[in-house]
Amino acid sequence: MGTVKDRVAIVGMGCTRFGERWDAGLNDLAIEAAYEAYEDAGIGPEEIQACFLGTASAPLIGIGGTVAAEALKLRDIPIIRNENWCATGHIALIEAFMAVASGLYDVVMALGVEKLKDTGFPGLGTGRGMHPVYEARRTSPGSFALIATRYFHANGIPVEKGREILARIAVKNHRNGSLCPKAHFQSPITLEQALKAPIIAWPLGLFDCCGNSDGAAAAIITRADLARSFREDPIYVKGFGISMDSMLPHFRPGFEWTSFNALVVSSRKAYEMAGIENPREELDIAEIHDCFTITEMLIYEDFGFSPRGRAWEDVEAGLFELGGDLPVNADGGLKCFGHPVGASGIRMTYEVYKQLQGKAERPERQIGNPRRGLSHTFGGPPQLSAVAIFGNEKG
Amino acid sequence: MTGIRSFGAYVPIYRLRRDLVAKAWGRPSLGGERSVANHDEDTATMAVEAAMDCLKGAERTETDALFFASTTSPYSEKQVASLVATVVDLADEVLTVDIGGSLRSATSALILASRLAESGGARNVLVTAADSRLAHPRSDMEQAFGDGAAAVLVGQEGVIAELEEIYVLTNEMMDVWRLPEDPLVRSWETRWVLSKGYGALMERAVRGLLQKVSLSPEDIQWAVLPAPDLRSHQRLSRRLGFQSEQIQDPLLEQVGYCGCAQPLMMLSAVLETAEPGQRILLASYGDGAEALLFRVTREIRDLPKRRGLQGHLDSKLLLPSYERYLSYRGLLETVPGEPFRLLPSATAYWRDRDPILRCYGSRCRQCGTLTYPLQRVCYRCRSKDDFDKVRLSDRQGTVYTFSLDNLAGRSDDPVVVQTVVELEPEGTRFYGMMTDCVPSEVKLGMRVELTFRRIHEGAGFHNYFWKCRPVRVEG
């Protein structure tokens, strides 16, 4: 199999303010993200040769590529839309990497956009089952809480202790989010607040769950050999991995709920392509899918950041804090930056991109001299995982 | 010999103390409790429960007719017998018939079933009966009614209670009725209904039957006389000359009057303890009356143990309030919960009837993996279309993981217990909601069984599927 390592680069990115954007429709959000990306890359829409659009919750039958064609007037070029649950944004990005790596296009855009708050979706990311019978009342919190119940049991962690560890993750992400002007939730919380919050889907409480946000993010992608003609500090793509398990995990025989094969496989594929052997040591920043605090904790282990069953020790030691050895979700994550489904993967990449350039909006949240960063989303009931790894220099 | 081969019963887990109803309206209480179907139950699901109890250990291929008797079918037009037959996994070459309209529908169905078996028209006929009648809030009937179901398997071989004789009467009077648009039962003046209707017709039917077979009341060991209230039951028993030791408890104090299912529920209770040689007199009332005489055979000793009525009576949860009853029965509309905008599809529901209704999993012929729902390509070895269908609805299992979801429930029952179950013995996974439980008492490893329930309304029809519940009766 081939590789995209150092063959593709990101030369411009944009990201809207996330949140309850009553003021903006789907098209407004797309315009806001795309024009920031154009400006960042120093180009105009006429230079885009293809657009990879990610948006998950299309109204009625679908929207095709109309957001890009209508709102951005990207006429006469291929616009390819995907929907892959929460990994939609990452899949759009990876499609763009492959399109450029194939040699077909020199400059393309990946655009993720989601307008959830016109649908009557409540504040919390309830999600929904897809099947009217087998998943009649399945919600996202209800599904991910199944992981927590089993994970605590399998690792001999008392539920109260487990909930405290999860609360620490929530506190971290809220602290990080409070430093991000574009984040949906910008208030820090205390451990006590997190633990005393109402239960949403036991054992998960309010602060263990991300919310429903509106937002969009965009990336301008080009050939690595052209990248420096756009800017001095392009960000190079080092690798990616995508994996989807077969069968809804709920029904899968022997499934243990303490690890997801899609997470393990997608991260290993990305590490392999990027030449990473020890992610805990070699990664300087990671944006991972914290739709729920338990998801973030599970990913620490499935991605090889922490030993099996012992992620809690790393959480207590502060490894993943902004000032820790491997900051995770430095922008607040899905938890606080927000989770407009189709935009999330590109938003997480935006954070990695800015950090690798040393351009976090505020100095107090800039990580010192990062070289390698990872972004990741995990979608579905859950089943589908997409990972991308970036670096600020070739090699 | 034609008669009953097997039997089963069902009483919903929820009971409502009649004192709560009385207190709400400042009226006298009839005392005791009445059964209340959970919000995910109706007469179709209750009939399935009773039928599964009745078919415990029975080969499905030998039954070629199924009758569903009810005055409260979930559909005005659409057969329920076909649904029950599919869910309990009978073959499709089965005569299915719904019988309704009268409170004596179940015994009429039993008579027709025995005639059909006797004539050779069917080897075995499964008669199911369920009712969940609604009375006006504040009425005595509201306190008196209960929800429940029963089933009997009628045939000619392995008969445990031979049907010796029947006696039928029809009688046209407007005593108790409902118009198509009425959710609530109407009736004329009670004293007239009970004296000229119930009392007079039941007495005539029982006397007529005894005269027909030249027996007297003392020849009967079990007098099964369903009644709308205790006083009517006592009056009738006394007038017919039955002694207290002959009289089967009419179930009014613990369950209530379960409409057309009541005679078969009482009959089930009798068959749970009856001895060979004993005679059972079963009567039923509604637009006339019917009386049936059974004689218990030695075969009853070989019948596998089942929950029956007593097993279900012993396992119960108290409904915490009268308001909850009103809401569960749709008499009170609570604030809408989270609207789940999943679009049900009648075609998809039909196409997937094997896994959804019959609860079939697939056992791979290559590697033996048993998965639910049916998988055409094996999850483990990927062999294609090479599997046997396996009914999983009668399996038990344990809770593998769960969550208590506060987002997805009805506002009158807000906690959805999302559950992953490991079914025995292969460890097949089932995912669904837990019902009939106290959410705060759910634990990993808890023993559960599957139960067929109404999961939501959508596209204008009822959507049914399996849930799990804590095992109601061990053993």
Image (cartoon, rainbow, N blue to C red):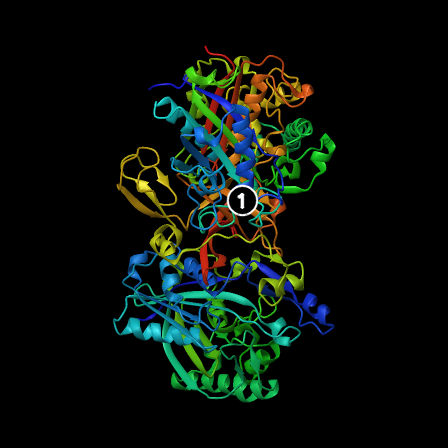
Rendering coords of residue A52 (x, y %): 43, 33
**Callout 1, which amino acid?**
Thr
Taking depth in this image into account, of B16 and A228 the one nearest to the observer is A228
Q: Is mark 1 on a helix, strand or loop?
A: loop
From the viewer's perspective, tell me whether residue A39 is left or right of residue B360: right
Residue B37 sits above or below residue A291 on the image: below
Circle 1 chain:
A
Residue beneath disc 1: A139
Q: Position of residue B466 (x, y in %)?
A: 45, 52
The answer to whether one can see residue A309 in this image is no
Which residue is at a point 30% across and 73% down the rendered structure image? B116
Q: In this view, does B194 lie to the left or right of A47?
A: right
- Residue in front for this viewpoint, A60 or B116: A60
Q: Which residue is drawn at 39% across and 48% down?
A: B392
Asked if one can make out residue B6 in the rendered structure from this viewpoint, the answer is yes
Residue A13 image offset from top left, x and y in percent: 53, 26
- Res A352 → quadrant: top right
* Image quadrant containing the N terminus of chain B: bottom left
Q: In this view, does A115 lie above or below B451?
A: above
Q: Quadrant of residue A262?
A: top left
